[in-house]
Image: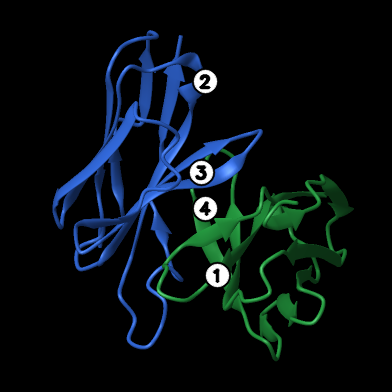
Amino acid sequence: RKEVEQDPGPFNVPEGATVAFNCTYSNSASQSFFWYRQDCRKEPKLLMSVYSSGNEDGRFTAQLNRASQYISLLIRDSKLSDSATYLCVVNWGGTASKLTFGTGTRLQVTL
Amino acid sequence: DAGVIQSPRHEVTEMGQEVTLRCKPISGHDYLFWYRQTMMRGLELLIYFNNNVPIDDSGMPEDRFSAKMPNASFSTLKIQPSEPRDSAVYFCASSPWVAGGRGADTQYFGPGTRLTVL
């Protein structure tokens, strides 16, 4: 089983739609969680951290379910510029400073 | 403020040749990470340094790969000899130390080096 699993997609949605991605992780001791965004042929960039209570940043909402070991990202009112690959990322914690990346979910927003 | 700088941006070489990738982290960052990204395996951590000291190299695929960080502003990843299966995008990332937190959490990636081994 992969340490961090994501549906690779692609998710093709029209502009203005709401789209949600899920991600599952295998290590129940994981301590911090993130969504990174990667545009085509570019480097990954931090989109947002994911907190246990859930958090929102504009049109983006991230949630964490520790009991079920999954993380979600909701994008409302999709824009063309949201087209990218979204990487689910987990830090196992402890003294290690390692992030484990999922292989990403590709989103394509169309007119 | 300059971000993470990597060179070269593209490298095409022949099997058996030595390849050296370079990285300059963001000034003041304590952690430096080397990743490899392929379509099949996604983004994989190869090695990371804390204050120029290698902490975890368990992701380095084999002895052909080596990494050094001689000072806080420079790191290299070397492949010798290179093989076609090493073709990938290699990213360097850095992150600051955060009091009470985990140093890896907020990583800033360089633009990557696209390596093709023929």
* Label 3 close to label 2 by CB (< 8 Å): no
Q: Nearer the viewer, mark 3 or mark 1?
A: 1
Q: Residue B62's x, y, as percent?
A: 41, 31
Query: What numbered label is drawn on residue B85?
Result: 2
Q: Residue at x 82, y 46 (%)?
A: A9
Considering depth in this image, is B100 or A41 the residue closer to the camera? Answer: B100
Name which residue type carries label 1.
Trp
Q: Measure the C-alpha gap from mark 3 to mark 2.
A: 21 Å
Chain name for mark 4: A
Would you name the residue on which mark 4 appears? A44
Please indicate whether residue A63 sits to the left or right of residue B96 in the image. Answer: right
Q: Measure the C-alpha gap from mark 3 to mark 4.
A: 7 Å
Q: Nearer the viewer, mark 4 or mark 1?
A: 1
Chain name for mark 2: B
Q: Measure the C-alpha gap from mark 4 to mark 1.
A: 19 Å
Would you name the residue on which mark 3 appears? A42
Would you name the residue on which mark 1 appears? A92
* Residue B107 lies in quadrant: bottom left
Considering depth in this image, is A17 or A4 the residue closer to the camera? Answer: A4
Q: Which chain is green?
A: A
Q: Residues within 10 Å of mark 1 (few under 14, many from 20)?
A: some
Same chain? Circles 1 and 2? no
Q: Residue at x 71, y 51 (%)?
A: A2
